[in-house]
Amino acid sequence: MVTATLDSTFAALADPTRRAILARLAKGEATVNELVAPFKLSQPAISKHLKVLEKAGLITRGRNAQKRPCRIAAEPLAEANGWLEGYRKIWEANFDRLDNLLDELKPKKP
């Protein structure tokens, strides 16, 4: 169901640490230890954030010998972007109407 997916996506994105983790993963895969380094959080705390991101479908974890690299998963973000896109179009139409109104209200040059 699209609504449940969007709910999970936006709930996961509500936390700044999780957004920062996704920003890091957008540059390429990383292990948990690599993700811990830039944060003042413990490895278990980062792991909890990763579980939320994984449950929301925003990341996947692979197996590479003893490492479990994390990768960003684009589909839920694309779905959220599609949902937001409809609202962007509404706002653009509102701004276009406002621009037209302001043009009409400008004094005409003789």
Image: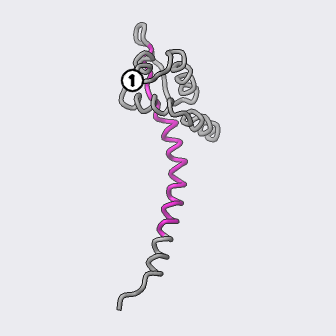
Q: Is residue 108 above or below residue 18?
A: below
The residue depicted at 54 percent of the width and 29 percent of the height is: 57
- 22 relative position to 28: left or right: right
Q: Residue furthest front?
A: 40
Q: Look at the magenta stretch and give its main secondary structure.
A: helix
Q: Type of residue at label 1? A: Glu
Residue 95 picture location, percent across and down: 49, 65
The residue depicted at 51 percent of the width and 20 percent of the height is: 46
Residue 8 picture location, percent across and down: 60, 34
Please state which of residues 5 and 40 is positioned toward the viewer in this rendering.
40
- Quadrant occupied by the N terminus: top right
Q: Which residue position is annotated with label 1?
A: 29
Residue 48 magenta = no
Magenta-drawn segment: 68-96
- 81 relative position to 38: left or right: right
Please state which of residues 39 and 86 is positioned toward the viewer in this rendering.
39
